[in-house]
Amino acid sequence: SNGTMCANGTEGPEATETDSSGTGRMRKPLERNGSTQNDTVHLERRLGLFSGVALIVGTMIGSGIFVSPSGLLVRTGSVGVSFIIWLACGLLSLLGALAYAELGTMNTSSGAEWAYFMDAYGPAPAFLFSWVSTLVLKPSQMAIICLSFAQYAVEAFVTECDPPRGVVKMVALVAIVMILFVNCYSVNLGMAVQNVFTAAKLVAVVIVICGGAWKLLQGNTQHLSHAFDGPMPNIGAIATAFYTGLWAYDGWNNLNYVTEEIKNPSKNLPRSIMIGIPLVTLCYALINISYLAAMSAQEMIESEAVAVTFGNRILGALAWLMPLSVTVSTFGSANGTLFAAGRLCFAASREGHLLDILSYVHVRRLTPAPGLIFHSLIASAMVLHGTIDSLIDFFSFTAWIFYGGAMLALIVMRYTKPNHPRPYKVPIVIPVVVLIISVYLVAAPIFQTPRIEYLYALLFIFAGLIFYVPFVKLGMTPRFMNKVTLFFQLLLEVVPTSSMAM
Ligand code: ARG
């Protein structure tokens, strides 16, 4: 049974994000094999350079480039500044990822941050990471992508006016339920959806770039001149503008979750990073220019769905292609995100970090249904409560605390493990610079534009300790939990993986 879980995971980051959550107690052999507890399926080294690049590019290009450009313009006030921030986000992602390349080649077990925190700081911080990614980071990714999906799906029908909020939220909830169904129904269906939809995403990107190039060749360059007219943004606004841009680049560390599956990781991990991230940066820069070839900055700000407006202006009779490819692409990202989330939840709970029930799989379908349902519930609550922009800020704020933590882990290990082999060694200024920027990214919005969400996020991270000490470190289980577990087992027809026939 566990083998099946793994079979679905071998596809990508999903596979080994499971490992990232096995914190607290150290169980080395299990942690190395990810979820292949029963040894039915091994995580083989199957990913070469090409798949490595595809994995990075496929994860990074999602909803962001179709949604964020307007938000970034609002926050920066001018085309020029916003373009610089798009490029800077790409550079920052590249630098961060290069530091992750050192970490990932030093410790070749999968699980990214979890594994590095474990090495550098020990189990409690590693637990806090898995706690936050399971309960906040993964569900908020899901919520953001589904809201973007909904925005495009609805926009397709109401072209020139703002789509009603309530309808967008309803459609986002429908998307969550559909994706939940797909992933509870069968692992293969989930994977098929993923592959088809990834291809569609690339089509959307190529359409936008070609359309923009065509417009520019016709001489539509007026919106690109006077790029720096407008007020200069303040320092807090720049940090939140970065959040918007960095969302579009999020996923730059995804290959680090599957280090165990990369062939010759000490070469292919750094190379995939050095090819993949500049490639995405180039696409994003070209797409931004394309948008401006078709509309002014003001029109971009007013458009609820930039890519649709773009399609209406440029594609003529084929305008419907744009919302279609964006919905297809965001649906695919959401599918992949829930897939990863379910497995993360599965692994964290199997290691005793979340409720047992969340690690169980469906008796016949062999899908981690309870974990998937759990994530979908949190994501739905986020959809109902938040907007795309507020969720992105909330997500980025929390995520960058951990990305910064990983930079610090690298620096700490240069001192604590000076002789550990480092097949790829990054110049130390890189993690130092990224660490400083991440401190700025986390601190600036708190001081400049204080919002209660940031406080919630911080409280939430540390609230993890309240659970860590009794339930993980001391291993206590309240009595009534057995009854709760039994109830859900009967309701959902799920069983622990160890009890299933192989
Ligand atoms: N960058 C993607 C987008 O623009 C989001 C990626 C979410 N992150 C992840 N690790 N799955 O939609």
Image (tube, rainbow, N blue to C red):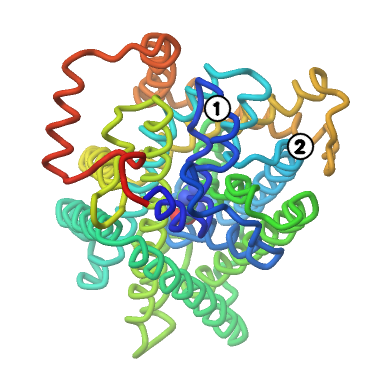
Residue 394 drawn at (x, y percent): 41, 34
Q: Tell me the number on the disc at residue 106.
A: 2
Res 455 → quadrant: top left
Nearest to viewer (mark 1 / mark 2): 1
Measuring 57% from the left and 72% from the top, which residue is drawn there? 222
Measuring 76% from the left and 25% from the top, which residue is drawn there? 411
Residue 421 drawn at (x, y percent): 85, 34
Point out the residue furthest to the right here. Answer: 419
Q: Is residue 353 above or below residue 276?
A: above
Q: Tell me the number on the disc at residue 435.
A: none
Numbered label tally: 2
Q: Is residue 195 above or below residue 118?
A: below
What is the CA distance from the residue labelled 1 to the residue labelled 2? 19 Å
Residue 182 drawn at (x, y percent): 27, 61
Q: Residues within 10 Å of mark 1 (few under 14, many from 20)?
A: few
Residue kind at label 2, given as amino acid type: Met
